[in-house]
Amino acid sequence: MKSLPLAALLAATTVAHAQVYTPPSPSNPNQGGTPTDTVTPRSEDKKSKTPFGQEIPMLDPASETITVGGVTIPMGDNRIIKARFEKYLSQPPEDSEAAEIYRETIDDILAAVSPYREKGPSLKDGWKLLPRASAYPGDARICGSLAEAVYVALLAKRDVNGLSNLNLELEKEKKRTISDGDWKTRHDRSSKVNEKSQIGKGTGAATKEVAAIGYAENSLEYTEFLRRIAEIEILKKANILKTEAQVLQTKIQYQVNMIQWFTQRRFEHVLMAARFYNQIWKDGDSTLHIDKNSDVSKLFSQSVGVNPTVSSLDSLSNEAIHEVDKAIEAFNYLLDQNELHTASKRLMEAFALGEYLSPVATLPRERKRRVQQYVRDLNDLYGMMQARDYTKAKLMVAKLKTQARDFPSAKADSAIAGYTLASDLSIEKAKALLIGGKSDEAAKEIVSAAEIWPTNPKLEEFKALIGSSSAVVMARKDFDRLIAEQNYREIFKRQYEFAPVIKDDPERLDAFQQIIENIKRIEIALNKAAEFANLGSSYSAWEQLAELREEFPDDQNLGRELEKLAPKVSDLAMALERARQFEARTPQQTGSAFAWYLKARGIYLRSKFAEEGIQRMLDQVLPEGSAPISADDDTFN
């Protein structure tokens, strides 16, 4: 059950007389009404974003591509690339004797089929070296696949040559058949003609000779010549179509391998395949026969705006090899300059593009290990920022600064400073609200602080404060209850308990200070009165307390002491009371009042109350401007 507002409790204790505590009058007409603050509430719908923009400084995870010569090559799943890169950083360099032999073999193959070879390119010499290169584990038997593709292409080419030879033989047969038919027709016409046929009308009509049935062009043998000639033509055209289809199919199968190796970033194998291609097919047709709507076709057409060719694959592979060489060269220089951040980027680019190339594969492990430690710490920092663990993140940023002179710490430093400050301010506000008894609002602030910085050490302090908050709340409730009961003495007795819990509440603090100061005054007066009473001056003790009683009529201790002194000073008290009664009558009985004040003065010569009453009466009876008469004058004695 919630306690009443403090102002209401204080207002209930107001009396006409002065008290130990006088509550202030309400000064804020809007209290309990509509809030007048202009603080804009924090939006709870906006989620905090990672200080790094969800990015890893090495490569943008969203792209998963790399561009070479204007062509954007997809890298596949970037998580796999990252895992392979981290594995690569911990692997030893491929500098074994077998690796050296493999790379030398690749160079020999490229040299054998190079157009710049002194005796011209030799497809046979290059093809013989492919099985040796395929034996190296790092080749993944791609050279074996290339050797098989070349072999199949040569077999297909042999079949095409066979069909061409077959067409030549068919052409020869056609010519022989035509020659035999012509000879047969001429000889049968000269010996077997026995009919004439008129051509046209009239006397001048011409005649022609017609062969008899079974002879010359009317013979079945002649018809067979014509049929064979037509059959030969059909066979020749069918062979030509079959040749073209077989050539196209063989090229497509070969080109599929080239494209696959290119997307796998096996650029040296693409170079070898391209040079073998030019030696197998010398017809000048190097267009890649792929579907225009395929991803591979779009890879080239959307990047450089042209249809891909074998020559373009060759050129892009050379460009990629060159880019890897330059990236490794830049990496070595940056690493020597202790610029690990940029060096890690260059190495990642070189690995993503040319994972299987010699400059990447032969990089010393010691140099890679430096990058590995830095990249690992960088990824840890990224994870810490994502988890909002700014305590560890701050330490990690300091570590990265010592590792890499080019580490871009501005964004991380700014994020850490901003979020930690926001969390601290929310916690401080929550403390103030909790102390003020606004536990619901304090809970919202502490939830906000925990969302911003879950590992904030001050959250533990706040947890400890919550543990003691029950005592704080109880002390505040006791204070308010004692105010309502006007039990100010109990507040004075427990002043060291109440002081810490109300120090941040201006209204309660003002009430507390009034009560403590006034009771101290009462206690001082009681102590002095006790001293006078011990010295036998009960009248002096009583007058001191009676004067204070008019100011604090509700103090029980003060009332009890006056009651104790009452029997000893009853004559003085009665004389003063009678004097006040005559003074207060209407009309005022100045003489009677004056006489009783004089009587009281006679009872206790140093009576302050009697002295003040006599002076008031003199002011009433003496005309204005007359010489003042002291109450100590002998006239009144």
Image (cartoon, rainbow, N blue to C red):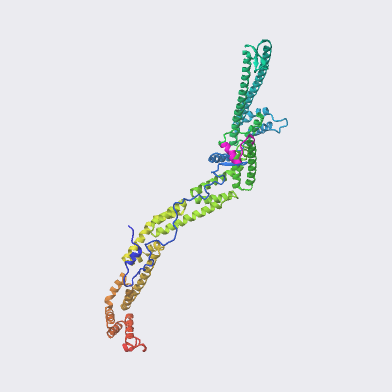
Q: Magenta span has 308?
A: yes
Q: Quadrant of residue 139?
A: top right
The residue that appears at 62% across and 46% down in the rendered structure is 335
Image quarter (top left, top right, bottom left or bottom right) of the C terminus: bottom left
Q: Is residue 385 left or right of residue 277?
A: left
The residue that appears at 42% across and 58% down in the rendered structure is 431
Please tell me whether the stretch drawn in magenta is mainly helix, strand or loop.
helix
- x and y, in percent, of residue 279 in the image: 67, 30
Image quarter (top left, top right, bottom left or bottom right) of the N terminus: bottom left
- x and y, in percent, of residue 103 in the image: 65, 34
- x and y, in percent, of residue 51 in the image: 52, 50
364 is higher (above) or lower (below) than 133: below
In this picture, which residue range is highlighted in magenta?
295-311
369 or 351, nearer to the observer: 351
Question: Does any portion of residue 227 appear in the rendered image?
Answer: yes
Q: How many marks?
A: 0
